[in-house]
Image: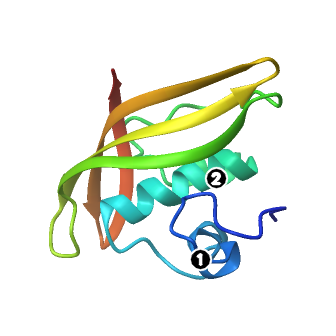
Amino acid sequence: MSGFERCPCGLGEAFPDCCGRVISGEGRAGTAEQLMRSRFSAFAVGDVAYLLASWHPDTRPADVELDPEQRWVQLEVLDRSGGGPFDSEGTVRFRAHYRLPGEKGTLTENSRFKKEGGVWFYVDGEHE
């Protein structure tokens, strides 16, 4: 599933013991931040099926196309509000670093999450 020894989300765990468990369905994100980290890791490993499944049905696109040349290489969580185990909504502000051939860049986003039926979903985000 992944060529990563350490999880791309940056927590320092082995991928199968961290976001790999959530992406494979073996585990579940307990907080909005955990879901956001698992989604970053899914972008890093190219798992479109997980990205769509973790997107809220009200805002989910029909498909997600990933640029095969883009590599997501680092994640920084900048801020969070709500999104805890006993919350039903939350936001996570993050900066994701990527590389394309001959270029490096960042994406900063404030993402909204919603928990329904005990499951966290990505709703949408505002890019800075």
Identify the element where label 2 is drawn.
Answer: helix
What is the crowding at mark 2: few (fewer than 14 residues within 10 Å), some, or many (at least 20)? many
- Expressed as whole percent of the image width and height from the top left, the position of residue 13 reads 59, 76
Q: Can residue 65 be seen in this snapshot?
A: no
Q: Is residue 29 above or below residue 110?
A: below
Q: Is residue 49 left or right of residue 78?
A: right
Amino acid at pointer 2: Ala
- Expressed as whole percent of the image width and height from the top left, the position of residue 74 reads 57, 46
Identify the element where label 1 is drawn.
Answer: loop
**Image quadrant where residue 22 sits:** bottom right
Disc marking residue 107: none
Q: Nearer the viewer, residue 56 or 85?
A: 85
**Image quadrant where residue 53 sits:** bottom right
Amino acid at pointer 1: Glu
- Expressed as whole percent of the image width and height from the top left, the position of residue 45 reads 74, 52
Q: Is residue 86 above or below residue 88?
A: below
Q: Is residue 55 left or right of residue 120?
A: right
Q: Earlier in the sequence, mark 1 or mark 2?
A: 1
Disc marking residue 42: 2
Residue at which label 1 appears: 13
Q: In which quadrant is the N terminus drawn?
A: bottom right
What is the crowding at mark 1: few (fewer than 14 residues within 10 Å), some, or many (at least 20)? some
Image point (43%, 53%), residue name: 36
Q: Is residue 114 above or below residue 85?
A: above
Image point (43%, 47%), residue name: 76
Q: Is residue 92 left or right of residue 8?
A: left
Q: In which quadrant is the C terminus drawn?
A: top left
Q: Can residue 67 be seen in this snapshot?
A: yes
